[in-house]
């Protein structure tokens, strides 16, 4: 009898786990900062209740990517299935998540930090005191930049394989014809023939300008076998700077390349740390 009761309990638990599924919503809205309509995917937790307030994660894609990448190329929906968390995945083109110096209709930092947050807060039941942002590659840079420049809006900022100093690495890209496709996006975002960041877009100076104690928890992970040596070196350099400044951060170098296998694996410890920081 006892064994039967145990078996029933296990079956019930397994059934409950199977029923726990996120609700994927494809949405869109007009973005004033871009003067255009942008699409996004919102993952709502199982049993979503509009009368409750949920923590949220804004998850950014990489260069040549789109808002569908995280749901089609990773198991993010499965990883958050049992979490009371809203995940927002916006489309941001090849923008580097900055306010373009060449295109007045390309204010992508404002799009993420202002327009997107406002839209989500008005339409979905989010807790504005528990917001996180993270991304891969270009999106890793974007998540850190947006969070450091708007520290009152995010309590956690995560970067996976973040490309953290792209204008300064242009010469490295020029030496590798297979990476020449990166250059047009850099010129549109930062201007032609630029070898340094415009004021306000350099992570190595932005964090210094933040008021002491205001920065969110910063999480950085990079693959030791990343294809571009500069990515690993820049991540190390930023981690050293954050440590010297006494920032609240975590830096991990782990086996892996600049690919979806790495990002699918490493988003899982990101989610774990977000739960601890946002307390849910």
Image (cartoon, rainbow, N blue to C red):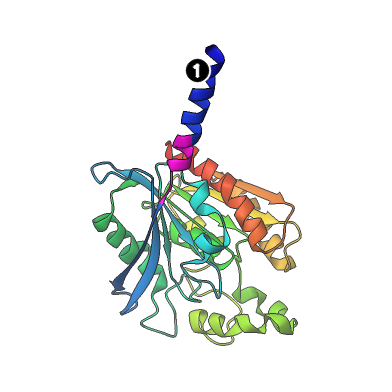
Determine which quarter of the picture holds residue 225. bottom right
Residue 13 higher or lower than 237, as above or below: above
Query: Between 145 and 197, which is closer to the camera in this rendering?
Result: 145
Give me the residue at 47% from left, 36% from top: 15
Residue 91 higher or lower than 49, as above or below: below
User: What kind of element bears circle 1?
Assistant: helix
Residue 219 higher or lower than 231, as above or below: above
Query: Between 115 and 238, which is closer to the camera in this rendering?
Result: 115
Q: Residue furthest bottom?
A: 192
Determine which quarter of the picture holds residue 263. bottom right
Residue 70 picture location, percent across and down: 52, 61
- 191 part of magenta stretch: no
Give the magenta-colored segment's residue range. Answer: 15-22
How many numbered discs, if any? 1
Give me the residue at 36% from left, 83% from top: 104
Residue 154 higher or lower than 189, as above or below: above
Please give the residue where the numbered disc 1 appears in the rendered image: 5
- 16 part of magenta stretch: yes
Give me the residue at 54% from left, 41% from top: 272
Give me the residue at 72% from left, 69% from top: 228
Q: Residues within 10 Å of mark 1 (few under 14, many from 20)?
A: few
Query: Between 132 and 86, which is closer to the camera in this rendering?
Result: 86
Residue 215 picture location, percent across and down: 46, 49
Query: On the rendered image, what quadrant is the C terminus found in?
Result: top left
Viewer can see residue 245? no
The kind of secondary structure the magenta stretch mainly shows is: helix
Query: Between 168 and 177, which is closer to the camera in this rendering?
Result: 177
Viewer can see residue 197? yes
């Amino acid at each position: 009898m006892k064994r039967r009761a145990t078996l029933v309990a296990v079956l019930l638990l397994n059934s409950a786990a199977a029923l726990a599924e996120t609700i994927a919503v494809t949405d869109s809205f007009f973005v004033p900062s871009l003067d255009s309509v942008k699409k996004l995917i919102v993952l709502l937790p199982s049993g979503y209740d509009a009368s409750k307030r949920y923590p949220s994660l804004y998850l950014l894609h990489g260069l040549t990517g789109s808002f569908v990448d995280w749901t089609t190329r990773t198991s993010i929906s499965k990883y958050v299935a049992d979490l009371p968390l809203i995940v927002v995945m916006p489309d941001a083109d090849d923008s580097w998540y900055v306010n373009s110096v060449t295109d007045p209709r390309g204010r992508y930092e404002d799009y993420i930090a202002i327009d997107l947050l406002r839209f989500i807060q008005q339409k979905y039941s989010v807790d504005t005191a528990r917001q996180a942002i993270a991304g891969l590659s270009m999106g890793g840079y974007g998540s850190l930049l947006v969070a450091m420049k708007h520290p009152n809006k995010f309590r956690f900022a995560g970067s996976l394989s973040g490309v953290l100093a792209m204008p300064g690495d242009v010469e490295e890209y020029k030496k590798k014809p297979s990476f020449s496709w990166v250059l047009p996006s850099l010129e549109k975002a930062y201007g032609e023939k630029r070898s340094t960041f415009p004021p306000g877009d350099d992570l190595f100076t932005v964090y210094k300008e933040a008021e002491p104690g205001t920065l969110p928890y910063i999480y950085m992970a990079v693959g030791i076998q990343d294809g571009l040596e500069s990515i690993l070196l820049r991540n190390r350099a930023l981690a050293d700077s954050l440590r010297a400044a006494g920032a609240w951060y975590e830096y991990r170098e782990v086996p892996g390349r600049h690919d979806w296998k790495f990002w699918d694996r490493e988003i899982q410890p990101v989610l774990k740390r977000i739960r601890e920081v946002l307390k849910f």
